[in-house]
Amino acid sequence: MHVHPEASGLDSRRMASVLQASIAVTLAFVALEFVGGYYARSIGLISDAFHNLTDVPTLLLSWFALYMERKPPTEEKTYGYHRAGVLAAFGNALILLVVGGFIFYEAIERLRHPLVVAADLMLVVSVVGLLVNGGISLKLMRGRHDLNVRSVFIHNLGDAASSLGLIVASLAIHFTGLFWIDPAIGMAIGAGILWSSWGILKETVNILLEGLPKGMTLPDVASAVLSVPGVQEVHDMHIWSLGSRMRALSCHVRIRDMNVSETETLRQQINSILEHMFRIDHTTIQFEPAPIKSGPRPTDGPFMPAPIQSGPEPAKDS
């Protein structure tokens, strides 16, 4: 079973348009933030400017990945380009890790050598940043079920939170004159970047290593298959993700003796359960007849856990 919902293609095109507009808006705001940070002598603003600057390659990567994901399968790329978005998310997460580390370093240096900060200018630029990043996040929220888009959504949501933190910091500096608040906010921004990027990095690595999709267990999937009347046993089960929105499964299913025409109905029932309960929309199921003679079997119940792996089956030697 292989499903390509038309709605996903439409959402992909809408998200691509949003990303294109976001690139232009982000570049304009980064320029404003760098200039404002320079004249305000705010490490918080400058660090946030670098953070926002990394939005540009992440937005470009995500836009390109959405374009590639819409391309149909070919003789060489038989699954299509579903992994393009995963690779983009992986690259975005790596960029975020580097930026987070850089911001931490700069903030520590500023704590050691504090400077006077122009809090009023810092406040104005931060308000603009909140409006820009908040608006982009709202536009991307609809597509956050896609790992690629979600990496950009989290990035921009972090930007909006950073701008909010800078607003609070600028007001605090204005009323208290405590300039160490600026690098402290910079460190908080860096921590937020590292935290958000680590989650995306773990999920993308799991997909690239053909791991079991997040929130799923093999026994649960096997139990669902075993609930279909006529299924006696399931083994050699492999589950992996082709992309952030496409999951695949292959398994061997032992069934009672039945006609070939009946197996097609059985296959449809299994596929329906897998798609409804686990969003698995690409399956390869091999049916096996029940043994004629009964006897001891190397199983632990109807589900054989020992040979099960998550990932595609290795090719057999001819």
Image (cartoon, helix red, strand yellow):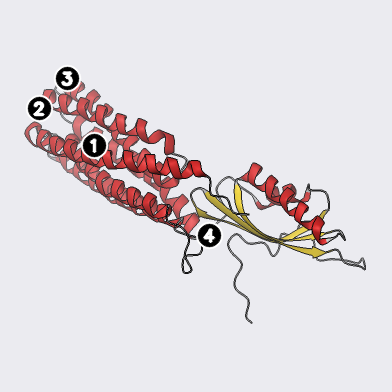
Q: Is residue 41 left or right of residue 299?
A: left
Q: CA distance from mark 4 to mark 3?
A: 53 Å
Q: Nearer the viewer, residue 128 or 268?
A: 268
**Type of amino acid at the residue the image marks with label 4:** Glu
Task: Answer left or right for 283 relative to 234.
Answer: left
Q: At 14% from the left edge and 22% from the top edge, which residue is drawn?
A: 177
**Residue that appears at 48% across and 43% down:** 8
The label number, if any, that marks residue 186 in the structure image: 1
Disc 2/disc 3 C-alpha distance (Å): 13 Å
Residue 218 horizontal/vertical position (percent): 66, 52
Amino acid at pointer 1: Gly
Residue on which disc 2 sits: 118
Q: Is residue 98 above or below residue 210?
A: above
Q: Residues within 10 Å of mark 3 (few under 14, many from 20)?
A: few
Q: Mark 1 or mark 4: which is in front?
A: 4
Which one is earlier in the sequence, the residue at label 2 or at label 4?
A: 2
Q: Nearer the viewer, mark 4 or mark 3?
A: 4
The amino acid at mark 3 is Thr
What residue sits right under mark 3 in the picture?
A: 176
**Quadrant hosting residue 185:** top left
Give the structural element (helix, strand or loop) at label 3. helix
The answer to which of marks 2 and 1 sits earlier in the sequence is: 2
Figure disc tally: 4
Q: For the residue marked with disc 2, what is the amino acid?
A: Ala
Q: CA distance from mark 2 to mark 4?
A: 51 Å
Q: Quadrant of the C terminus?
A: bottom right
